[in-house]
Image (cartoon, rainbow, N blue to C red):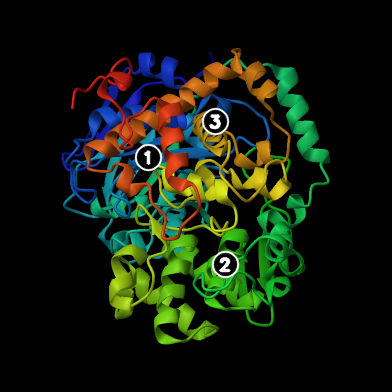
């Protein structure tokens, strides 16, 4: 089976030391990316670690496909103990960082400890340099990028950094790269902030060789370049009106299922503001959305559909430029737009201020700086809901994505069992329900669907492959088999082990069946949970038996 190559670089920011560790056995079993990082985190982060403490570690990794020239592979993974959910969590980001990371010669970089001073860390194939940078305190993401370009002659594509939100330990702060691309969910930016690390750069000329079939790569690349998929023009916003009209677009903090101004913030409205094409590394699909409004002087990349929901319909905002501005503020401060938008929507509900765009923008800045009401909202909806007097629309303390589990029952089950919580990308069961491949209503047969899609997503995030490659049909199970020179079921097994290690770690931190709950009822959910656990080979209380992971987990908890 093809897998990433190179040692683990373990960095202790408190001691200003770095060590190279051979992890070939882990790579051969876990490929790279999310699976590899989950394995390392499971074995190397103490169960009782504080997400903001020195014992927590954050991992960056690519997979074998970042050593290709194929479309849909300009992504990489980030993993750590989440300050939002309290469990192991992975996020991935696009842009151009991944291949610069590969050029260092490392498969994985681990960051632990806590620095006494604000640091920029430079990782190259010649070693690691620790640079104290107190002048960057409070700097926004573009300012960090400008500083590193000026001081080190490195481009935005070499940089992973945090904004003020990460420094201020906002529980859903992002790690940002290439200015506007985000390791978005779960607060990994706050983990870097807790370690007093403002930025990390990657550069070198030591990418290891990974042999991948050239004909498969070229076929995918050519199809991406010639595709007429709507996503190439409108990104993920192309389905906004379809979802609003046929399913549900959560509106005014989930109180309503339909937004009357969906067309004003949907795909056509976004496309009208798009002024050029943009992509990720090596990708000919070019689905990114550089947008601007010259009249109001707003320029950003996006918003994608999740931001159209979180800062549009869920806040009662029907002006696309207002949503663009919210998107840009989150990018420059380093905030996850889904969690931030939901937190703002909860606040608007508590104040009866839906539709107040000026208040939305003020509140985003308050969250990033933990000022006024922003200090409460920076804790996330789950921790703030009682004081706000609103319903807690989260799972495992993670705010919901747009795809409504009250209507898409398979996606609702996916939210419930996902180790990451209310995140739509953990299984993307929603796609089958939107497409009519399975009925949206009911849970019959869906536990197995959710399970296999979870496994696929975990493997996909280990390869690392863009999720849109599968959703648009450009990379299939057969493509994966050819690229990885193995049967697809072997890749399912990699995904299954990843999900189990996440769950096993989280179980030891106290999460069990009680955490697999929703803030609304779906008929048959308890029976579906029983079936899901049985298919996984887990206990009825949602825990993973120790002997299930004993074969591939080297730590006895």
Tell me the SS state at disc 3: helix
What residue sits 48% from the left and 86% below the top?
A: 353
The residue beneath circle 2 is 250
Q: Position of residue 425 (x, y in %)?
A: 53, 45
Quarter occupied by residue 171: bottom left
The reply to whether callout 1 and callout 3 are in contact (CB within 8 Å) is: no
N-term-proximal mark, 2 vs 3: 2
Camera-side residue of 139 and 241: 241
Reply above or below: 161 against 553.
Answer: below
The CA span between labels 2 and 3 is: 27 Å
- Examine the rendering and report whether any part of residue 154 can be seen: no
338 or 143: which is nearer to us?
338
Residue 41 lies left or right of residue 423; in this view the side is: left
In the rendered view of the protein, which quadrant contains the C terminus? top left
Give whichever of 349, 127 is nearer the camera.
349
Label 2: element kind: loop
Q: Quick check: 135 left or right of 275?
A: left
> What residue is shown with label 3?
452
Q: CA distance from mark 1 to mark 3?
A: 22 Å
Q: Residue shown at 51%/30% (left/top)?
A: 455
- Residue 281 is labelled as none
């Amino acid at each position: 089976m093809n897998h990433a190559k190179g040692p683990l670089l373990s960095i202790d920011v408190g001691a200003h030391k770095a060590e190279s560790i051979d992890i070939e056995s882990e790579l051969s079993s876990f490929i790279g990316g999310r699976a590899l990082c989950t394995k390392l985190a499971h074995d190397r982060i103490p169960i009782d670690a504080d997400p903001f403490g020195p014992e927590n570690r954050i991992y960056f990794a690519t997979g074998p496909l970042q050593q290709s020239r194929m479309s849909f592979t300009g992504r990489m993974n980030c993993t750590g103990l989440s300050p939002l959910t309290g469990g192991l969590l992975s996020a991935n980001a696009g842009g151009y960082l991944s291949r610069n990371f590969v050029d260092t010669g490392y498969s994985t970089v681990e960051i632990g400890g806590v620095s006494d001073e604000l640091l920029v860390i430079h990782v190259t194939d010649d070693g690691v340099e620790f640079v104290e940078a107190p002048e960057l305190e409070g700097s926004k993401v573009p300012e960090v990028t400008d500083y590193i370009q000026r001081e080190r002659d490195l481009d935005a594509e070499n940089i992973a950094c945090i904004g003020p939100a990460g420094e201020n330990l906002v529980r859903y702060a992002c790690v940002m790269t290439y200015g506007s691309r985000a390791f978005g969910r779960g607060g990994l930016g706050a983990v870097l902030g807790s370690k007093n690390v403002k930025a990390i750069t990657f550069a070198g000329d030591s990418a290891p060789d990974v042999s991948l079939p050239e004909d498969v790569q070229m076929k995918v690349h050519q199809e991406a370049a010639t595709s007429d998929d709507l996503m190439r023009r409108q990104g993920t916003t192309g389905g906004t009106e379809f979802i609003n009209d046929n399913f549900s677009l959560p509106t005014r903090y989930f109180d309503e299922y339909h937004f009357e101004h969906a067309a004003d913030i949907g795909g056509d409205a976004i496309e009208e503001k798009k002024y050029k094409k943009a992509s990720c590394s090596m990708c000919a699909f070019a689905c990114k959305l550089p947008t601007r409004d010259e009249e109001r002087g707003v320029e950003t990349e996006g918003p994608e559909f999740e931001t159209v929901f979180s800062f549009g319909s869920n806040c009662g905002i029907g002006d696309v430029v207002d949503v663009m501005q919210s998107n840009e503020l989150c990018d420059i401060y380093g905030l996850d737009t889904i969690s931030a938008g939901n937190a703002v929507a909860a606040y608007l509900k508590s104040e009866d201020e839906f539709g107040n765009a000026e208040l939305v923008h003020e509140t985003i800045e308050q969250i990033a700086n933990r000022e006024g009401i922003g200090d409460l909202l920076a804790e996330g909806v789950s921790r703030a809901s009682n004081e706000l007097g609103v319903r807690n629309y989260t799972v495992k303390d993670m705010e919901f994505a747009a795809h409504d589990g009250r209507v898409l029952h398979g996606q609702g089950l996916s939210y419930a069992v996902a180790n990451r919580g209310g995140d739509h990308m953990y299984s993307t069961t929603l796609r089958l329900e939107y497409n009519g491949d399975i009925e949206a209503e009911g849970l019959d047969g869906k536990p197995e669907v959710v399970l296999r899609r979870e496994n696929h997503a975990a493997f996909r995030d280990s390869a690392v492959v863009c999720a849109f490659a599968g959703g648009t049909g450009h990379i299939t199970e057969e493509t994966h088999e050819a690229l990885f020179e193995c049967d697809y079921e072997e890749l399912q097994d990699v995904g299954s082990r990843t999900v189990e290690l996440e769950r096993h770690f989280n179980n030891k931190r106290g999460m069990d069946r009680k955490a697999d709950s929703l803030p609304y009822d779906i008929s048959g959910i308890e029976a579906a949970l029983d079936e899901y656990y049985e298919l996984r080979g887990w206990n009825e209380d949602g825990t993973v038996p120790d002997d299930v992971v004993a074969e591939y987990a080297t730590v006895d908890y």
